[in-house]
Image (cartoon, coloured by chain):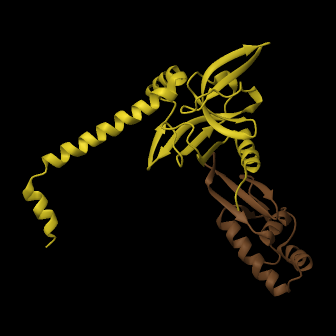
Chain colours: A brown, B yellow
Amino acid sequence: MQETTYQKDPNIVFRKIADEVILVLIKQDVGDFQSVYTLNEVAARIWELIDGERKVKEIKDKIVEEFEVTPEEAEKDLAESLQKLEKFEGIKEV
Amino acid sequence: MNCGTIEFLELSNEILSRGSCLRFRARGGSMSPFIRDGDVLKVKPAEVSEIKLGDVIFCRTGNRIVAHRVIKKVSENGKGFLVTKGDSSPNSDEPLHPEDLLGKVVTVERNGLSLRFDGRVARLINLLLTKISPFSRWIYPVLRKVKHMLSLGYQHFNRRKQSPFTTNQSQGGV
């Protein structure tokens, strides 16, 4: 898990609004506002950091540094966010 | 989190500019009764040249984003402009610059049913609605009254048709 790298799905359109990020998935050629996904501040930062190159471990270190949380808390938040983003088809493993 | 007008416009623009369609819930009643508050619209990307009279387009007017009907096409200095109007609005909108056109409404979903706008019958209805559009503020209230009276008449007719036996049976509940 720590060595895994993720990339954003190219079929996702997103906008940052204040500290949050709203994601719209284009599926079967339709961008459906009936199923949008909203990321809170931490998840939004994780989303920003996912670039197809950074490993999960590096993202965790950034979260620990920027949000002043323990590595365990960061790991828990990260695992939860990645799982939800994968389920939404917003990211995939490289 | 609410997706504001600007964000909705930007996201819509990006989706449509990729050549994909857009699906969202309509708010407001300016196109009532054809499109009602809460209906789900599907919009496809479109150019001014492919827009016909009567089409319902998704566009930017001022600082709003609307789905209104095209009631006139005008040409000025070799540039095509569209004039739109909400079916139940008293006045038409300002002429639309081509760059403010975002797409064209292709389906309206309500109560699990989907009405396609690109069929022959829908095109005829659209054209008819365009012709009566200037008089919509007088026609629609009259039609609403007629519909209301018809539904009252239907209810009265149904009540008279029910026999006392059926009524007693349904009230028994045993």
Q: Quadrant of residue B145?
A: top left
Q: Quadrant of residue A9?
A: bottom right
Where is B106 relative to A31, above or below? above
Q: Residue at x 75, y 53 (%)?
A: A10
Image coordinates for residue B68, horizontal then vertical, percent: 61, 33
Residue situated in front as seen by the camera: A86 or B12: B12
Where is A83 relative to A31, above or below? below
Quadrant occupied by the C terminus of chain A: bottom right
Q: Residue at x 69, y 72 (%)?
A: A83
Where is B57 relative to B110, above or below? above
Q: Residue at x 35, y 36 (%)?
A: B147
Image coordinates for residue B58, horizontal then vertical, percent: 65, 36
Residue situated in front as seen by the camera: B21 or B148: B148
Residue situated in front as seen by the camera: A13 or B146: B146
Residue B126 appears in the rendering: no
Image coordinates for residue B125, horizontal then vertical, percent: 46, 26
Where is B61 relative to A4, above or below? above
> Left or right: B103 with respect to A7?
left
Residue situated in front as seen by the camera: B37 or B147: B147
> Left or right: B146 with respect to B55?
left
Outermost residue on the right side: it is A65
